[in-house]
Image (cartoon, grey):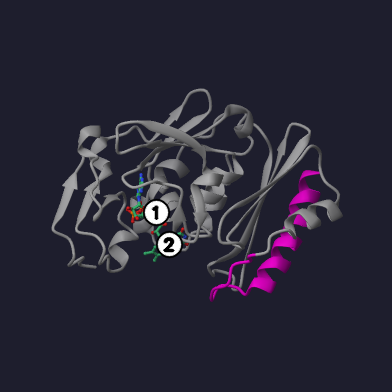
Amino acid sequence: MDLTSLDHIRTARTRADLVLGPRSAPLAGGTWLFSEPQPDLSELVDLTGLAWPPVEVADGLTVAATCTLRQLADLPAVAGWRSQHLVRECLRSLVMSEKIWDAATVGGNICLALPAGALTTWAVALDATATVWTAAGGAYELPVLELVTGVRSTALGPGDVLRSIHVAPDVLASPATFARAALTRHGRTGTIVVGRRAGDGFVATITGGAPRPRRFAFASVPTADNLHDAIDTIDDWYDDPHGAPDWRRAQTLRLAEQVRLELA
Ligand SMILES: Cc1cc2nc3c(=O)[nH]c(=O)nc-3n(C[C@H](O)[C@H](O)[C@H](O)COP(=O)(O)OP(=O)(O)OC[C@H]3O[C@@H](n4cnc5c(N)ncnc54)[C@H](O)[C@@H]3O)c2cc1C
């Protein structure tokens, strides 16, 4: 749609161009930015002109914020990366057209911070670390788990830009399993549970069911009761037309037991 509040769309070519004013925002694929009015914005700064390499396979996987969903999905299979299948499983949870698949970016998906953000699920389930560039020219790292803090809410400060996310090689080598519930067969996500073995340990990641991602780690595969009790500490189940809180809680507990049994 036309964004009538905008005065400028500027393309960043170098880091010095990433100066964002109070009414500026980074533009990535634009699939969300151009889908509804943005009355608080007068400028968009297009990140795609920075020409960051979309994916780098070295000491694990580094994905540029501007990597499109299709570029990530099309990464050839890497020998030994037992959790690589999660990319496509997470992406399939997005309700999107072919056009969005080609334009939408990993960074845009994570920074939009929707509870069921497909790349948020993928990144948190793989303990990914985000690198963020600050307005002052510095950088810092934080787990993607801590980057997404709530519905449309992130830990990014004013002028911060997500540069990339990194997944460590041992995590990519660990087996993982994905389970999703929706109210209808092709409906929006109600809840997602990803289970992953981490050495002898077990990690369960919940997205969609709650406003922000949750991660539960155990030194070994937990008992059904232990996993149930851990997940049942969530006390803010998400409520929207795609699922009531009590339904999301019940589905999350059911899927968690399913992934626990698959990985035991
Ligand atoms: C029909 C339709 C269906 C959709 N379905 C889903 C869905 O099922 N799940 C879902 O999660 N989303 C969905 N979306 C929302 C959106 O399209 C996706 O989340 C998409 O991945 C956003 O990526 P983008 O690159 O287009 O982001 P943009 O629209 O360019 O940006 C999104 C937000 O992130 C900010 N941003 C972008 N990149 C950065 C960066 N590097 N650093 C800091 N901030 C940044 C922007 O300023 C903006 O606030 C849907 C949208 C449409 C139109």
| Residue 227, percent from left and from top | 79, 52
Q: Which residue is mark 1?
A: 101
Mark 2 near mark 1, Cβ–Cβ under 8 Å? yes
The amino acid type found where label 1 is placed reads Trp
Disc 2 designates what residue?
96
**Is 118 rendered above or below residue 203?**
below
8 left or right of 71 in image: left
Instruction: Decide: is 111 above or below 81.
Output: below
Quadrant in the picture for the C terminus: top right
Look at the numbered disc 2 and give the secondary structure of its residue: loop
Sequence order check: which comes first, mark 2 or mark 1?
Answer: 2
Q: Residues within 10 Å of mark 2 (few under 14, many from 20)?
A: few
State the extent of the magenta-drawn residues as a range: 236-264
Residue at the image point whose x is 59% and y is 70% from the top: 185
Label 2, ligand 1: CB separation under 8 Å: yes
In which quadrant is the N terminus drawn? bottom left
- Residue 7: image quadrant is bottom left
Q: How far apart in space, not on screen, are marks 2 and 1 (Cα)? A: 7 Å
Label for residue 154?
A: none
Nearest to the observer: residue 156 or residue 72: 156
Q: In this rendering, does residue 244 appear at all?
A: yes
